[in-house]
Amino acid sequence: MKAFQYATAHSTDSARQLVADKGAYLAGGNDLLGLLKEYLISADTLVNIKSLPGLNKIEDGRKAWTIGALVTVAQIENHADIKKTFPGLHEAAADVASLQIRNVATLGGNLAQHSRCWYFRQRDVKCLKKHGDLCYARNSENRYHSLFTGNDCISPVVSSLATTFAALDATAIVLRDGKELRWSMAELYAEAWKNPYAHNSLQPTDLILRVEIPTTRTRSAYMQASDKHAFDWALVSCAAAADMVDGRLKSPRVALGSISPVPHQSEAANSFLEGKVLNDATATQAADLILKDAKPLEHNAYKMPMAHALVRRTLLKLKGDA
Amino acid sequence: MPSWPAETKYISHSTARVDGAAKVTGKARYSSDIQATGWLYGMILRSKWPAAKITDINLEKALKVPGIRAAVLARGKEFTVRYYGEEIAAVAGTSKQACLDALRAIEVTAQPLPFVVNEADAKKADAPRVWENSPNYKEPNARDRGDVNTAFGQCAAVIEGFYSTPVQIHNPMETMGNTISWTDDGLTAWSSTQGISSVRDGLAGSLKLEHSKVRVITEYMGGGFGAKFGSGVEGALAANLSREAKAPVRLMLTRFDQALAVGNRPSSFQKIKLGAAADGTLLAFEMDNYGTAGIGGGGDAGGGGGGADIPAPYLYKVANSRVKQSAVAVNAGSARAFRAPGNPPASYGIESAMDDLAVKLGMDPVEFRLKNDPSKIRQREYALGVEKFGWKQKYQKPGSSPGVVKTGIGCAGAAWPAGGASKNTHGEAQINPDGTIEFRLGVQDIGTGTRTVIAVVAAEMLGLKPEQITVKVGDTRFPPGPGSGGSTTCPSISPTVFDICTKALQQLQTQTGIADARGENWFAACKKLGVNSLTVPGQWIEGLSSNPAGGVQFAEVEVDTETGLVTVKKILGVHDCGLIVNQLTLESQINGGIIMGMGYALYEERVMDDLSGVMLNPNFETYKLPGIADVPDIEVVLINMPERGVIGIGEPATVPTAGAIANAIANAIGVRVSSLPITPAKILAALGKVPPATA
Amino acid sequence: MKNPEPENFGAHSRRTFLKSLGTVAATAATAQVKSVADGLEKVNAEKVVGPDAVAVTLNVNGEKLKLMLEPRVTLLDALRNYSSLTGAKEGCDRASCGACTVLINDAPVYACQKLAVEAQGVEITTVEGLAQDGKLSKVQAAFVEKDALQCGYCTPGFVMSVTALLKKNFHPTAADVKHACAGNLCRCGAHPHILQAALKAAGVEHTSKTEIVNYA
C-alpha cells in the first residue's frame, strides 16, 4: 500500500471533510485494504468511521427493522431475532466469506464493495472500469460475469446482502452532503447499470448510515451456488421474500445476485407470483420470467440453468413447513 | 542381509509428530520467520508484460527511497522477458513498506512483444514465438508398439475421447524464499526448500562461491510439493542484495509471485483412442497428447522427457499402441516437478478412457481393470477396496440414480515407479555419556514427518522411547542426504538410521564391554563412555527399503443436475505401504494426497488471459483450494508389507484421486465431462442444459 | 506467558541473533499529503496521524508491545516484522487463507487485513499466547495427538480458529467446526485430522476407521 494518513472521525461532517480531499472511509477495511494493496485506488487519508455514533445498532421497530451500517456481518449472522424475522438475511449473512471476515466486515462496506471482476482486480490490466478502453471480460474470460448489462462493463454486483435486501424491499439511508437519501437496492446500484466506471451509486463522500427492512414479508429465504462449499464467492445468489395469506403469496419478490450490476429483479416475475400458490409450476414460471432477456456470454451461460434452479428452490423454501 | 525386527514397539504403530508441539505453539521458526541480526526485508519487481524487450532499468529513484539499502538487477538492463511475472529487479530495505515504495520507483523501459498464452493457439504455425529461434511446438515422433491400426479393426468396442487437465500451481502455504546473509566469512541461507544441497549448489554456482563457504539451513518449511529445489532467481537476488546492503536479507515471494514464477504442473490435452475385445482384453491404445510447461518446453519440468510428457498407457499392458506427445511453449511461467510429475494427468486420462470403454462394453469398471492391470498389488488393492467400499452394492449404470441429485462411484489406480531410496543418504548420531542422543541428517522435513520417522526407527533399534531421541535435520553441515522428492525420503533415512543404530550398538559394545546396550542397559552403557561423547556415522544400506508403490482409490459423489454442483461424499484409498514406519503420519500423507487430487479434479486451474497475457488468478480467491467444508469422508486401507521394507507414499497418494472422482461424476450423470477441473459450468454443459451465448 | 523478546523493539537488542528492523522516515511524497492534513486538522480538530511512523501500543497475549509504525503497517506485519511474534504466518496477505488468524477480543480475524493502528485498545491473542507455563492448551494438545498438521504453516491459524470456536461453543458438531474453519486453508490436506482434533478438544473421541491389512 502507499503511505497514508489515518484519522478517526467523530462526526459525519468531519468524516466527509477528511474524505473529500482524497480520503477514503475505513470501516471493516476488507475491501478497502485489498484495493489499496493492489494500488487499484488511491487514498491519502484513511478515515476511520467506526467511532461515528449511532451507526452500530440493530433495532426492532415492529413495522421495520433498522440495521446500522457499522453492524458487522457476524453480528447479523448471530442475531437470534433476525434469524426468526428475516431468515433469508440470516442465511445470506452466514454465507458471506469466512468467519474472520464476517467479524470485521460491516453492512455498509458489504453493500459498497467494489467489483470482484478479475480484470478490475488485476493490478496490471487497465480495463474499462478503470478508465481503460476495453472491457476485457466481454471478449475473454467471463465465466463469473453478468447475464444482464446496461453498459459495456459486465462486472456484476456480488453483495449477497444486497440481493437479500432487494427481495425484502429494504431501503438504504445514505448521507450525501449532510442530507439523508432513501434508496432502494435498485437505486443504490443504478449508477453501476448506467456507468461503466461505477460500482454503485455512491459518490466518494457519501456515507451509508443504515438499512431499514420492512416487516411486511414474513417469509424470506436465500440460497447461493458456488464452486466450493464455503468461503467462495457466489456464482449466482438468490433471495426471495413474501408474505403468505391463505396459502397464497402476498407482495412476493425474488432477486438474483452476481448476474447483473444491480440485484436483478423482474416486474413480470414479481407480479406473476402475486396471489399465487407456490408450487413447481409457479416457481418455474417465475424463474422463466426473471431470466427473460438475459444475454449469456461465451463462458457464463451456465448461470442460466443455475439461476433458474436457484429461483425455483429459493421460492419453494418460502413454503416452509406449510 | 539386514532386516527389520519382526516384533516392534514403535515401527508400524502410531507416534505423535515429534515437532508437533513446536508447530502448534508458534515456536517453530520457518524460513519466513527468521530474524537474523540487522535483517532487511527484500522484494522483487516482476514483469507486467507477458513478453517484452527490456532496454533499460533505472534503479536510482528506488535507491533514494528512505530505508532502502540495496537494489539489484535480475539479469542486467537488456534482456527479453517471456512471461507475466518474470523477475526484473529486487530491492532490500528496513521495512516492507520501504520495499513496496522502492519497487514502484524503479523505471523500466520496455517494448512489448507479441505473446501467446494458450496451448491450442501456440501450436499454430503463425503463433507468436515464445523463443525466437524455435517454434513453440514440434510435431512429435510416434512411439509404436505392434500394429494399432489392425488391432483397432479387431476390437469389439472402441472409444475415442479428448481428456484435458489444466496447469496446476503448487501453492504451498509458505511461499518460496530465503533469508540470506552473505559476508566475507561466507553465506548462510535459511531456505524454504526441499533440498538444502540443491540450494547450496545453486548459490555456490551462481555466485561463484566455494561450497565450504555456503551453509543452508532448513529447520522448518511450509510445504513444497516439488517446487522448492534449487536456489532460484529469488535466492541469487537475496544473496546479491545481502552483499550490497551488508546485512541479511529476508526475501520471501508473495503469493502473487508464487503463482506466477516458480513452477507448476504442465497441462495435458490427451486425444485417446482405446479398444478392447469382447471379453474385455485391451487390444489397442492410441494417444496424441500435448501440454504446456510454460516457457520451459523441456528440461527439468518433470514428467519424463519434453516437460509435458506423461506415461502412457500408464498402468495397462496393451500389445498394440501408438503414443505421440510433445510440449508446446507459451508465454507463462515454466513447469517444475509437482507431486508425482506426469502421473495424475496420466491416471486421469487413461482411467477416464477405461471407464468410457467399460461402459461401452457393458462391463463393470473394476472387472474391466482387473482383466487388464498386470500388477498383482493393484489387483489385491481393487479386491480389498471393492469389499470395503461396497462397490458391488453401490454400482449403478451411468446416470441411473434417481432424482435431481445423482450419486455415482468411480475408481482409478496409480503406479509410482520411483519412491526407492537414495543410496547417497548419510547421517550421524552423537551419544553422550548421560545417555542423551542426537541424530543429525542433512535431509528436510517438508511436512511429511521425517523427524518423527527418524525418532521412531532409532527408538525401535535402541530400545528407547521416541521422545528420548533428539533429531536435527536440515543443515548442510550435517551428513548429507537426498532432497525430499520422489517419495524417497522415508526409504532413504530409515535404513540409514538403522545402520547408525547398528553401528552405535557395536561401538558401545567395543568401548564399554556391554554386549547389548539397548533399552534398560542404555544409560549404564553410555555412562561407561566416560567424558567423551561417541559420534557414530552411518549410511543407507541395502535390504531394508524398496520401490515401487501402487495404490487405488474409490470415490463416491453427488451431483446436483440442476445446478451442476458436486459434493464428494467419500473417498477410499487402498495403498501398499511397504513396512509402515509410523501409521499416524502415513495417514496424514495419504489424506493430503487425496485432498490435493480432489482440488485438481474439481477446483484448480491456472487461468491465463488471451487478451492481456496475464494470469487472472494469482491468489487464493479464484485459484481455489479445497477447504474443510469440501473435504469428504476419507478412509484408508494400508497394506502393510514388511517383507518389502520401507517405501515412499507421498506421491502415489495423489495420483488416482482425480480419475476416481471424474469417473464417479460420469457414473452419476451418465455423461462424461472430460476436462479438469470439473466445474458446475462443465457439468451443466455436458447435460445439455446450457444455452448458446447470445451477447 | 511471556512473549518472545525483544523489549525495546527498534533499539539494539542485547540478543545477538535477533534484531529489530529500523523505523521508516518520511518520504518525499508524503510531505505534501501531510501539509493538507495539517490544514484539515485545524478545521476539524480530528487528530490526523501519519504517514510517518506513530507510536502504537498493542496488547498481545497480555503484554504491551510498544512500536513505532506507519499507519499502513498491518497487524500481521507488526507481529512478524516489528516484533518476534512470528507465530501468525503470512500465506497470502489478502485475507484469503487464514494463516494469519489471530483473536481480537476472542473473535478470529485476519491480521493481514487489520491495520496495526486499529488494533489498539483490544486484546490480541496469538498462538504464542495459548500454552500456559509450557503446557499445551487443550486444542494444541489435541492437534498434536491427532496429527492435525503436516508442514505446520497453516497450523497457528487453525489453532486460533478452533480455540475461538470452543470458547463460544463447548459442544460443537462437525458442521460447527467446518463453519468455524472455512476461512482457513491447508495445502497439505490435514483437514480430516483437524476436524478430529477440534472434536477431541471438545471431548468427542474419534475412532479411526483406518484398516491395516497384511499382504500375504
Image (cartoon, rainbow, N blue to C red):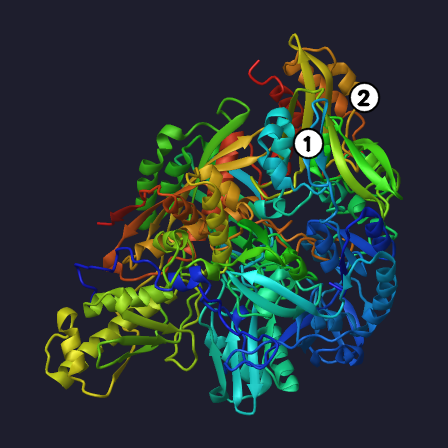
Q: Is residue B108 above or below residue C158?
A: below
Q: Which dot, 2 or 1, sits closer to the camera?
A: 1
Q: Residue furthest bottom?
A: B184
Q: Secondary structure at mark 1?
A: strand
Residue C68 relative to residue B325: left or right:
right
Residue A47 relative to residue B523: left or right:
right
If the image is split into quadrants, where does the C terminus of chain A sit?
A: top right
Disc on res. A59: 1
Tell me the CA gap for discs 2 and 1.
Answer: 30 Å
Residue A236 place in picture, x, y as percent: 68, 35
Q: Residues within 10 Å of mark 2 (few under 14, many from 20)?
A: few
Residue A151 place in picture, x, y as percent: 87, 39
Q: Residue at x 59, y 25 (%)?
A: A84
Residue B582 place in picture, x, y as percent: 30, 58
Is residue A188 in view?
yes
Is residue B78 in view?
no
Residue holding disc 2: A267
Residue A96 relative to residue B427: left or right:
right
Chain of the residue that carries numbered disc 2 in the rendered image: A
Q: Residue at x 31, y 63 (%)?
A: B546
